[in-house]
Image (cartoon, grey):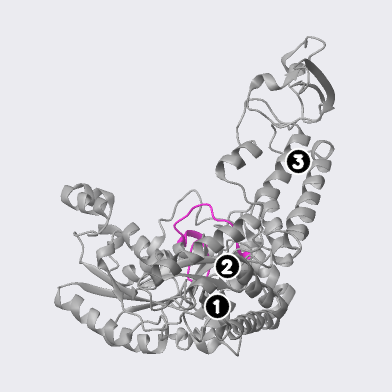
Amino acid sequence: MPATGEQDDLVQDIIEEPATYSDAVLSSDDEVCVRYSSQSDTNNSSFYQTATKKLASFESLPNREHHEDFIKKCAEILIREAVFEGTNRKNRVLQWNSPEELQKLMDFTLRTSPSSHDELLDLLRNTVNYSVKTGHPYFVNQLFSSLDPYGLVGQWATDALNPSVYTYEVSPVFTLMEEVVLREMRTIVGFEGGRGDGIFCPGGSIANGYAISCARHKFQPEIKATASVTNLLKNIANIILLLLQTKGLHSLPRLVLFTSEDAHYSIKKLSSFLGIGTDNVYLIRTDDRGRMDPSHLIQEIERALAEGGAPFMVSATAGTTVIGAFDPIDQIADICEKYNLWLHVDAAWGGGALMSSKHRSLLKGIERADSVTWNPHKLLTAPQQCSTLLLRHEGLLSETHSTHAAYLFQKDKFYDTKFDTGTKKFNGDKHIQCGRRADVLKFWFMWKAKGTLGFEKHINKVFDNAKFFADSIRNRVGFEMLIDQPECTNVCFWYIPESLRNAKQDSDYKERLHKVAPKIKERMMKEGSMMVTYQAQKSHPNFFRIVFQSSGLDRADMLHLIEEFERLGRDL
């Protein structure tokens, strides 16, 4: 019976009074008699249904007798309903319910008394049932999808071990594993000998924030000491400006960074978070394919210098969020060298293309970057989250962020403390977090399983799928592409219903077309047939952006998706 949140829902019958306190407290192996009360639908009379139910225990330790069967049943539900049924093409991507309906269908309330294991199993089934199946082949809505079996096992192992990666004594396996994976990623980027630094981060946004922080420290190392809260308190005006979020820390030089107008919003957001201020993020124009314009970058750098600003960083993008454009990194690197600016490449989305000898030329020049963000949970389909920052500068992460907490990073440990003190090679005190999840395991396990060659085959297939999809709609009646030749696996297009195909000259054409994508999205969501996102950009009315990163799809899936757009939109 679903929980109601009321204490009276659960009545525990105690037959004999306990002689001691310990007798009165349920142990983890106790079974209790639970009595449920319900109302008859026909005669409104009450009755009691009594059954023996095993309640959840309060101790935070698994007990084989009490928990083994429960954990196995939970695993069976996840394997059957989330993993295999959730990725079956014959099943829906989601079972849509409005927020009001879902609040009635699931019991979200918390209560004082414990739940039975049977109740918890029902809650788990409902959680799976009413969630979006992001591993489904027709979930092509975000820059993550798929359900890699090897990554999943690595994810489960991570949760079973529940490590925190900051010292060798706590995480010996993962400390060494991170360094191996990060070094190999730096090698693939093109940093000489794989040397440099790096860290697994909680998302690409935080990785970009690390890059900004390191670039600022490299430009002005004293900022670590002078931008303290103590100094800020001496100047109330500066605090007010900081709270306004657009003026930055005026007790320091007016730092200016540059990124494209199509860059990820995290560059602005983390600049605000770090006190640089969003006004000091200069946006560079993009061309008709979404790539940064180097000539405009030079103009904006010169403008910042003329204004008395202190340019310190350019953030290029390798695979923009919407269009999937790759900025001309080599040209931007030349400009950064001329003006002595830090070059960061946000390759969170497009970095996976580096695994393919066929497609890595999209990121030509990335080896010249000072820092690179690369998210394996995107194009490489590692389970979320799995994000990295890679640096060519050894020791800079530790130099920028370490505080040498004595309760973690003691110098007199019985083993070589270079493995956990944030030296040039290893982790330790170089991250802004204290506790840090071992996101490396799932990616390392996938890499072990597939090999680098397997990742290359994966990338080649998803690019081939995207090309086939684009080629199939380019001259198909009812479809119009935003970018005729997409660079990445993002394909942006309009579906134009028959009612609008001869109306392009009408004054309200764009307004009417703008309404098509939201309506088709509503229909696909309510049916659960697929999930594809849409957006407006610049002067363009709403268009669809379909993204491919699952190598489990084939050309038949591409044609199915195309036909689904036609089915959902033909009568609009």
- Crowd rating for badge 3 (residues with CA inside 10 Å; few <14, some 14–19, many 20+): some
Which stretch is magenta? 420-440
Q: Which kind of residue does numbered mark 3 sit on? A: Leu
Q: Nearer the viewer, residue 307 or 194?
A: 307
Place of residue 14 in the rendered image (x, y in percent of width and height, measured from the top left): 79, 14
Can residue 264 be seen? no
Dominant secondary-structure state across the stretch colored magenta: loop
Identify residue for label 1: 478
Query: Up-down: is 89 above or below 25?
Result: below
In magenta segment, residue 347: no
Q: Which kind of residue does numbered mark 2 sit on? A: Gly
Query: Up-down: is 62 above or below 137?
Result: above
- Which mark is nearer the camera, 1 or 3? 1
Task: Mark 1 or mark 2: name the one nearer the start of the chain.
Answer: 1
Q: Which mark is residue 121?
A: 3
Query: Up-down: is 138 above or below 227?
Result: below
In magenta segment, residue 430: yes
Distance of label 1 from label 2 (alpha carbons): 10 Å
Distance of label 1 from label 3 (alpha carbons): 47 Å
Task: Mark 1 or mark 3: name the one nearer the start of the chain.
Answer: 3
Q: Which kind of residue does numbered mark 1 sit on? A: Gly
Q: Residue at x 48, y 75 (%)?
A: 347
Kind of element beneath mark 3: helix
Residue 276 in which image quadrant: bottom left
Identify residue for label 2: 569
Q: On the rendered structure, is 63 left or right of 285?
A: right
Kind of element beneath mark 2: helix
